[in-house]
Amino acid sequence: MSESVNMLFEMACALANGPQDRFVEFADALRALDEVSPEAARALAAKVGLGRRKAYYLLEIADMRQRMAVPAERLRGIGWTKASLLARYLTPKNREALLTLAETRTVRDLEILLAGGEVSGDQHCVLLYFSSGQYKRLSKALLSFGAMKAGRGLVGKEKALMKLIAALAKAKSV
């Protein structure tokens, strides 16, 4: 590695291993490194345990920040998850409205709104932990009630779960 690439590599590595609220600076450093040496950027990602997807999202955040002149402080307030969602949608015309939306909404609400949906105020989140075997059984059941595979996860699982519950309730009353 050249001296300048090595300096960028070391700076990005320090940012990656620092506090999580430095994600904007890390994204910028990763982008700068990727521009001069994609191989060094991949080596950095491997060294700090950064998966390909997260690296891609961080690069998108750096591109958005540069393209749209979004202050680092504002993105830190929004958080990296919401910032990565905005990266695909932010334009000069909607910049202020979407940044404000991200500052005032949850990640889930922002995902729905950016996709053109409507947010229901009457929703509850349930977090469940399953063993591998239990998750396999749950996935199979949800798929049979209308959920669909999407990447490593499922979409439509809420509706599928409610259909499953309705079927169980109906079976008990028979």
Image (cartoon, helix red, strand yellow):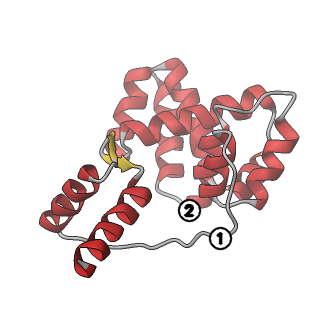
Q: Along the horizontal axis of the image, is 47 left or right of 61?
A: left
- Report x, y in % for residue 135: 21, 63
Q: CA distance from mark 2 to mark 1?
A: 35 Å
Say if residue 97 shows up in the picture: yes
Q: Can you say whether 82 is above or below 1 in the image?
A: below
Q: Which mark is residue 77?
A: none
Quadrant housing the N terminus? top left
- Report x, y in % for residue 167: 29, 67
User: In the image, what residue occupies the spot 65% across and 45% down?
Assistant: 83
User: In the image, what residue occupies the spot 28% across and 56% down?
Assistant: 142
Q: Which mark is residue 19?
A: 2
Task: Give the residue type that dot 1 points to.
Answer: Asp
Q: 10 Å neighbourhood of mark 2: few (<14), some, or many (≥20)?
A: few
Can you tell which quarter of the image residue 46 is in? top left
* Of the pair 70 and 130, the residue shown nearer to us: 130
Q: Secondary structure at mark 1?
A: loop
Q: 10 Å neighbourhood of mark 1: few (<14), some, or many (≥20)?
A: few
Decide which of tag 2 and tag 1 comes sooner along the chain: 2
Q: Secondary structure at mark 2?
A: loop
Q: Can you say whether 114 is above or below 14 in the image?
A: above
- Report x, y in % for residue 161: 36, 63
User: In the image, what residue occupies the spot 48% across and 33% down?
Assistant: 56
* Of the pair 116 and 38, the residue shown nearer to us: 116
Q: List the single residue furthest toward the bottom.
A: 173
Task: Give the residue type that dot 2 points to.
Answer: Pro
* Of the pair 148 and 126, the residue shown nearer to us: 148
Disc number lying in front (2 or 1): 1
Q: Which residue is mark 1?
A: 122
